[in-house]
Image (cartoon, rainbow, N blue to C red):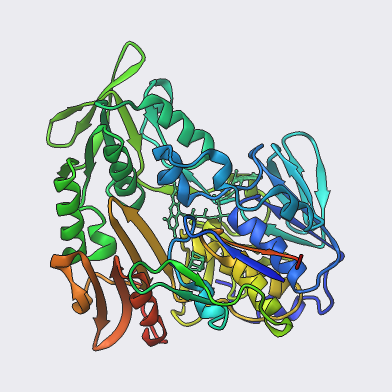
Amino acid sequence: MPRRGDLGRRGRVSSPADVLVVGASAAGLATVEALRRKGYSGRVTVLGAEAHLPYDRPPLSKQVLAGDWEPERARLRPPDALSSLDAEFLLGDSAVSLDAATRTVRTAAGRVLTAEAVVIATGLRPRTLPGQENLAGVHVLRTLDDTLALRADVWPGSRVVVVGDGVLGSEIAATLSAMGARVTLTGPQPAPMAMQFGPLAAGLLARLHTERGVELRLGTATIGLVGKNGRIAGVQLADGTVLPADVVVVAFGAAPVTEWLSGSGLRCDNGVVCDSRCRAADGIYAAGDVARWHHETFDSLLRLENRTNATEQAVAVAGNILGEDRPYAPVPYFWTNQFDARIHVHGLLPADAEVSIVDGSPEDRRFVADYRVDGELVGVLGWNMPKQARQRRADIARVLTPSG
Amino acid sequence: MKVTVDEEKCCGAGTCVLLAPAVFDQRDEDGIVILLDERPGEDLHAIVREAASVCPGAAISVGEDA
Ligand SMILES: Cc1cc2nc3c(=O)[nH]c(=O)nc-3n(C[C@H](O)[C@H](O)[C@H](O)COP(=O)(O)OP(=O)(O)OC[C@H]3O[C@@H](n4cnc5c(N)ncnc54)[C@H](O)[C@@H]3O)c2cc1C
Ligand code: SF4
């Protein structure tokens, strides 16, 4: 594992003449903004596989799926703010290879791009079930196009099965159920998000979903999909049941987009492996969901899939490109909205943590819970109390152990 | 500098408050952003731009003074 300083000695002192960012979403855009904010005036190019102007993903499973927002409302920046960055956006073209030694990126359209600093911000791609691409009515949710396709396939009364009881699956189940679909949520855990939240908050989430009409079929694995005449008909569970379905959403995790880096010379292992400066090799950095970097406080490799990490890591990368030489060691944070619950999590919520309510009450569906390990505060969960949860963030122990 | 916030986009993260408590606060009841100072002084411009850039709801816009 590259450690602090390993690559640093070879790092350049002056700032690079040009920067190429691969991936034009939250992390990629925030890198460019941070470079400019820090006074960088060199050439900046942003390569993005999607043809859309950079947009935000959290609203996809919330307001955009629900139809409350037009897709344009999810744009990360208005077009004039993008042009004021004085960066060249090459959209609708994807990187197909990188040569780390010369920092040369080749694209699907045949471009050859070279820069003194390259930032990898290619995010994740959803995992899928075998055969799902051949069945109409089976969806994933990562992009705007995915969202619009799912939205167009669901109508009030549709039988929807969401495969995946993590944050994304639970959120999609909530949104589709509120839209009038008959939703079943299935996954291996005893309650939605049980691994992330622990039994208390996950139990409350299970109650909320059940009250609002989501059928929970948890604690069982999904074996595969059942089709009929090229369209989805059901989801086969390990216990033998087939859940009938008009539409299926597969949301049981996503993998870092790193295939294009094979042969690059970079180490990819559940993400682009980086040192504490988010540097994968001399002049090459990674930010956002794709980056697995050495978190100095945790003293381990960490990869986070959340929105604030994408931007905050991008700020760190921009600083390190410009020679700040600072480790990136954030207190993790994410939020999720499900029905009327706005849940905010700061720090880590390890499975063995002792959980205590420190503000509000679960009965009122408004509370803050502390998560402690050996008496030390390692995480905070706020349920409809975002401000009060955030105020405890500063107390989260500096020395944490990630849950594994 | 003129700052605007979009309450509907705000997810209540409070990132802005952590960065620039003189400019942003959150409502006690639902955590939605409160703009304390829509024309912050020069010394705050850099940090307010950073808050706008890292806001996870893309809810903060910074424009030039009219
Ligand atoms: C539906 C949904 C809801 C979410 N909700 C929340 C939430 O409520 N709270 C939260 O904290 N987080 C949430 N997240 C997570 C958050 O959106 C991500 O952490 C964030 O988008 C990561 O940003 P990124 O820039 O690293 O990656 P991405 O947003 O995945 O962007 C990567 C970009 O790179 C492009 N790309 C990929 N390969 C190539 C290539 N070879 N060449 C060029 N471009 C390429 C992709 O097309 C994409 O545009 C959600 C995610 C999703 C999908
Ligand atoms: S950082 Fe953005 S989303 Fe968070 S409270 Fe401030 S305005 Fe709202």
- From the top left corner, tell me how far across and down residue A169 is, in percent: 32, 45
Q: Is residue A41 left or right of residue B14?
A: right
Residue name at image x 46 percent, y 72 percent? B14
- Determine the image quadrant of residue A34: bottom right
Report the quarter where the C terminus of chain A lies: bottom left
Residue name at image x 28 percent, y 50 percent? A339
**Up-down: is A208 above or below A49?**
below
Q: Is residue A12 left or right of residue A215?
A: right
- From the top left corner, tell me how far across and down residue A18 is, in percent: 84, 61
Q: How many marks?
A: 0
- Determine the image quadrant of residue A215: top left
- From the top left corner, tell me how far across and down residue A168 is, in percent: 36, 49
Q: Is residue B47 left or right of residue A192?
A: right
- From the top left corner, tell me how far across and down residue A20 is, in percent: 76, 56
Report the quarter where the N terminus of chain A lies: bottom right
Observer able to see residue A178: yes
- Determine the image quadrant of residue A319: bottom right
Residue lying farthest front? B66
Residue name at image x 53 percent, y 34 percent? A145
**Up-down: is A218 above or below A284?**
above
Residue name at image x 58 percent, y 45 percent? A259
Say which of A234 and A294 sits in front.
A234
Say which of A231 and B5 sits in front.
B5
